[in-house]
Image: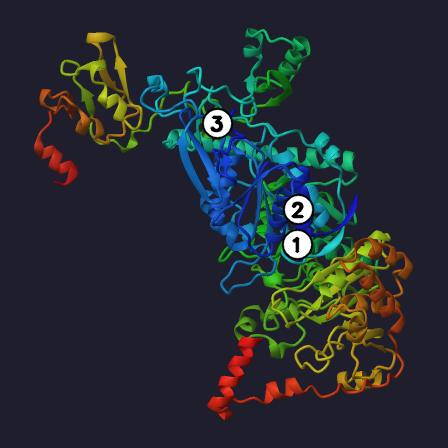
Amino acid sequence: MDGSEKHNGNEGKRLLPTRNQHREFHVSGRMVTMSQQQGHASGETSAPQRDGKLLGFPVTKNGRTPEKPHGLLKAPEILSLEELARRSIDGLDYHTLMDQLTDRGPDARLLLAYRDGKLVRQEIFEDPRICKDMQRGAVIHNLEQKPVDVSGWRVHDFYIDSKGCLGEICSRCIRVCPENAIHLRGDGAGSFAEIDPKACKGCFICWVECTRKSADCILIDGKVFHSELRAQHFGE
Amino acid sequence: MRLLLSGNAAAAWGFRLSRVQTYPYYPITPSTNCSEQVATWVGNGELDAVVINVESEHSAASAVISSAKSVRAGTATSSKGLLYMVEVLENASGGSIPFTIFVGNRATGAPINIWGDHSDAYAVRDSGYIQLFATDAQEALDGIIQAYRIGEDLSVRQPVMVNLRGFTGTHTYEGVAVPSAAEVDSFLPAFLPLEPLLDPDRPVTYGAMLSAPYYRRHKRNQSAALMNALAVAEKVGRQFGEQFGRTYRNIEWVGDQQAELVVALMGETARTAETVVSQLRGLHGIPGLAVLKIRLFNPFPAKDVAEALFKAGCKAVVVLDEGMSHGDVFPPLALRIACALQTHAGNAAPRVASVIGGLGGSEIRPEHFQTLFNLAANISEGRPYRREPYWLDIEEDPILLTDQSKVDPKLWKRYGDIWKAQPILSQYHTPLSGSNFELRLYGRAGQGAITSAVFFTGAGVENGLRVLTKPTFGSERRGAVVHTDTLLHTGGEHSSRSFSGRQDLVCIYDDTILTSPAHAPAQNLKPNGTLVVNTNQYSPARVRQLLGLTDSSISVYVIPANQIAGELRLGSYFNMVMLGAMHRVCPHLDFDAAMTFYEKNVPKPKEANLEAIRRGYQRVTQQETAPVPAPPPDKMADAYFDWRPEEETLEEEILRSMEVIRG
């Protein structure tokens, strides 16, 4: 920050480093005061060009997400013999590694850890898992795995009638579903929302939030919205 | 680098050398000093880590688990603190999150008790943690470094607990070899998160809800990974030995290769058992003896234990547990050993008896092991024995019968026949040659008795002696009588950590303790022992008279330490004077050699303290001393003590209050 040495005429005040483009923060003792950033006389005239995708996150000068400081928290790569064969990774002694992997049997894995683009650790180990469909520590890889069968709680069938659904124009149920169990199918005007019965826990939130109640969009056990069911469920 | 460290400080060094990156903690006796030491290093910049002062152990465990998803983390706790962590502990073992907890083992009330036993570690034995038990400060340091290696092994990835008995382990000062940071770095690779929590390219969810089919499949994986720790711990212990010269095994066998009688136990007490075995071995009428020390308690090396006992031709194994499992067949260690033997040795299994001892800081002394080996001998000869745990040191329920009149009649009905059939075999009770020099300092809290004992130990360690100091704790309020025990090994290959309870040298820091009926400070002096008293009002003859000392082989020395400290303007800090006096009467540590240690280490004012040590050394005497003349009457003090508010007139009161205001 270029203003770090400026004191704004106030002795003993310390400027906090910040990514905020239009405000600056000064600390004196236990008090923090806020003022307009230099060069931003008023917030209105130079409203930031916020990208909708970054709403709520810090906006940098070039409008892009901040660079990651380092690869400290980067997950290592874990490869089986087959996966290693499919890849071509520079700087690896393929001959030895593949021999070693074959010697250790089908559960042998090669770990490759990178930091700042450099290989820092390379180790062959035996995967201790018996049930290979489960990640270690029952961790879920959010981008690769879909929610699995967690619907043991559900006592009703939830079904979205595609005739009444507004699809991507509305998509309210998709956004409010706490289990990420509702997905959009199709494009544009023909799109509609669909409930994955394996992931749905039957919480009724989509049913309550649906903007098309009058069009009987969401069916519960094949029944349309009616006050009796609502009273039964919410105790009204 | 050899340093004088307490068990807690050694554990802190373990964390420091392992380059722990996050250390959240909540203090609890007796493991507080470990965390304080780590926090001090982080504060002064010697250790690059984040210390989080959390509001409870529950939060400490939560913070250590969440940080260990991405960086190397550790914490320390004890007793109820560990029990308070229980709710979140399994999130780490289930989530395959490796880190290390140092546990200063302590009893779990009620009744409240701050001293050492294994109750807390036993309480969490089923939470999926790898548990190592350390014997002394050195093993705690080495154990923590190995713990990170074991827990972070790619085929394991499970959290580890390193256990050291509270106070007798965590507060005992002894010489510890501290490896250099470079050596440890080459042994312990940098932390590598397998599933980092905050990698934006690969977001992960920890602790998602899973239904039964997935849950059981995950638990199968978790159990497989934990059991891998058996082989990994053995390998890591061996590699540690190759690099640092101290090899560790999952189980350690001390004694005869062919041993009919075995005592199995864990932790700090093992050293005492080893000395007993080394002294009883080969005596007439005694078969092969051994101590089986379990270092890796969880996962339990069942096959190794069964094999070791089977190969040694063991006929009876007595298991000593320093903790309980209320209502179970046996306490945890005995249960695991009995089960391992039944599973892996079947009909060839030796008989197993269980003994509960050491609860809430109870001492386990060499004579206890003599009784245990006697019990094992009786069992191996086919005599009847109890299928329930025996108890150490309960007069109404002894292991071997000495006095029937003391035995509880209910128990006599149940076990009378067993007691009658179990003889006391005299060969097991041969007096042990207690060749160690034992030293006890009595002082009032605040007088620095513990400091001088620690200085003495430091000088001994620096000069190659095997010395350790164990302060007593519990009543540390200022002015209470405290004592500290120092053990100086003067021979024998096995270093005992157990005090015989009989001293060669007793130093009394305050002559009011002489007349304290609750302490009787000289009653356990050995013949030919020595007594040193800080007094300027009693002569040695008078001290003898006050203590009722009839044994003329005991020599009594006096020293006016307060007076000497006053001459040197040290105020009431006379512990260095007493340290000098101790050197005069202790034959095992050369005074000049010790002085070079003190010159480097005494606190400020340095010169005065060194001179205090020298004067203490010179002026301690067995001679009859001339009583110091009574001090002149102090008018101010007399007026102060004579003053009674009810006798004061209003006028006097006003005057007095104005005096106070004027200062």
Which quadrant would residue A90 be assigned to in this image?
top right
Q: Nearer the viewer, residue B617 or A7?
A: A7
Q: Is residue B314 visible?
A: no
Residue B170's tag is 1
Q: Quadrant of the N terminus of chain B?
A: top right
| Type of amino acid under label 3 | Leu
> Residue B182: x percent and y percent?
74, 33
| B385 is higher (above) or lower (below) than B183 | below
Q: Are marks 3 and 2 in contact (CB under 8 Å)?
A: no
Q: Nearer the viewer, mark 3 or mark 2?
A: 3
Residue beneath label 2, please?
B11
Rounded to the nearest angstrom, the CA distance separating label 1 from label 2 is: 9 Å
Provide the secondary structure element on which disc 2 rests: helix
Q: Nearer the viewer, residue B233 or B110?
A: B110
Q: B77 left or right of B267?
A: left
Provide the secondary structure element on which disc 1 rests: loop
Q: Quadrant of the C terminus of chain B?
A: bottom right
Quick one: label 3 or label 1, which is nearer the N terminus?
Answer: 1
Residue beneath label 3, please?
B198
Q: Chain of mark 3?
A: B
Residue occupying the point 17% across, 29% down: A208
Rounded to the nearest angstrom, the CA distance separating label 3 from label 1 is: 36 Å
Q: Are marks 1 and 2 in contact (CB under 8 Å)?
A: yes
Rounded to the nearest angstrom, the CA distance separating label 3 from label 2 is: 30 Å
Q: Is residue B105 visible?
A: yes
Q: Chain of mark 2?
A: B
